[in-house]
């Protein structure tokens, strides 16, 4: 049976505390709550992110305090993440508690996330019709790992924002299910900007009837906001919230809110007059 994400976060917190004895354990607890559906959770989730870290952290740190980036890419992806965090970090504000963290990061090894990345139970539950060779490959992805960082970034209008950032080298649909849908929660923002454009994919994220959307719908709650390239999806998030012309050189990126369906009239109840 797949490992509970809470156990994974607990181990990450223990490693963090070991490397940073002078930092408060409170930060680990808050990150735990964010990914476990706690009241503090305002999560930005970005599957197939590639190396697209800096812009989301600067642009959306006023809306989210925890960022989860994931991608199956290997090679220099981990080094790219660490370099991006080093490049984007900003000094801790002067008017800040003395025990507030400044900048820390540590690697997440394969042993820490092997069960979190394992897709065997997920595939059997959602996609039993997959060809056996594809299911066997996806069920045991090679060498999952990641990084975790806590840092201050310059958000909108340069205001310092404290964020917790996960980068995980694993498949994004299964990870969504384990971190959110299975726990009855959802990220505040789901970003599918890079689907099909970096490294290929096994699921078309922009298709509202494909794998990712199916898992999102299976959860009792859904993301509040969807970020995607203009004209690149058919999800029922259709109310325009914001446009970003400086994020992608070739496309306008848009933030959408979901259009809520008209409430159905209750059975046996008269409609209240206005």
Image (tube, helix red, strand yellow):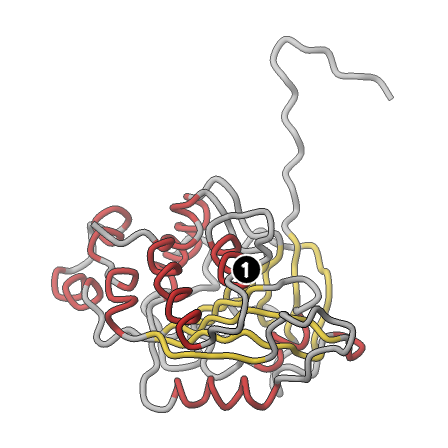
Q: In which quarter of the image is residue 71?
A: bottom left
Residue 33 in percent (x, y) is at 51, 52
Residue 66 in percent (x, y) is at 56, 64
Looking at the image, residue 220 sits to the left or right of residue 74; the answer is: right
Q: In which quarter of the image is residue 62?
A: bottom right
User: Closest to the observer: 237 or 109?
Assistant: 109
User: Closest to the observer: 93 or 266?
Assistant: 93
User: Closest to the observer: 197 or 91?
Assistant: 91
Task: Quadrant for the C terminus, please.
Answer: top right
For the point 63% across and 50% down, the residue is: 258
For the point 59% across and 73% down, the residue is: 101
Residue 15 in percent (x, y) is at 37, 70
Residue 225 in percent (x, y) is at 62, 57
For the point 60% across and 70% down, the residue is: 163
User: Closest to the observer: 101 or 136?
Assistant: 101
List the single residue furthest toward the right.
274
Tally the marks. 1
**Above or below — where is 270 with respect to 207?**
above
What secondary structure is found at the residue carrying circle 1? helix
**Above or below — where is 93 with respect to 180?**
below
Looking at the image, residue 54 sits to the left or right of residue 16; the answer is: right
Residue, disc 1: 26
**Above or below — where is 222 with respect to 35?**
above
Looking at the image, residue 218 sits to the left or right of residue 98; the answer is: left
Graded by Cα atoms within 10 Å as few (under 14), some (14 to 19) or many (20 or more), the crowding at tag 1 reads few
For the point 20% across and 62% down, the residue is: 139
């Amino acid at each position: 049976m797949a490992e509970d994400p809470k156990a994974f976060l607990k181990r990450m917190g223990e490693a963090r505390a070991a490397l940073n004895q002078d930092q408060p354990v409170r930060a680990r607890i808050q990150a735990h709550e964010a990914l476990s559906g706690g009241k503090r959770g305002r999560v930005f989730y970005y599957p197939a992110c590639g190396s697209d870290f800096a812009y989301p952290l600067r642009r959306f740190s006023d809306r989210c305090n925890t960022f989860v980036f994931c991608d199956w890419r290997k090679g220099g992806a981990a080094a790219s993440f660490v370099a991006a965090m080093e490049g984007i970090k900003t000094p801790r504000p002067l008017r800040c508690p003395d025990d507030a963290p400044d900048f820390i990061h540590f690697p997440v090894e394969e042993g820490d996330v092997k069960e979190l990345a394992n897709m065997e139970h997920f595939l059997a539950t959602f996609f039993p019709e997959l060809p056996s060779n594809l299911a066997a490959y996806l069920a045991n992805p090679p060498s999952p790992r990641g990084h975790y960082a806590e840092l201050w970034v310059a958000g909108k209008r340069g205001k310092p924002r404290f964020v917790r950032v996960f980068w995980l080298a694993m498949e994004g649909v299964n990870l969504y299910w384990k971190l959110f849908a299975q726990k009855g929660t959802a990220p505040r923002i789901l970003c599918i900007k890079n689907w099909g454009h970096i490294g290929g994919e096994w699921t078309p994220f922009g298709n509202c009837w494909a794998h990712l959307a199916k898992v999102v719908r299976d959860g009792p709650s859904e993301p509040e906001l969807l970020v995607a390239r203009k004209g690149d999806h058919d999800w029922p998030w259709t109310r325009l919230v914001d446009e970003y012309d400086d994020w992608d050189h070739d496309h306008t990126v848009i933030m959408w809110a979901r259009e809520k369906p008209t409430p159905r009239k209750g059975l046996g109840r008269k409609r209240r007059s206005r």
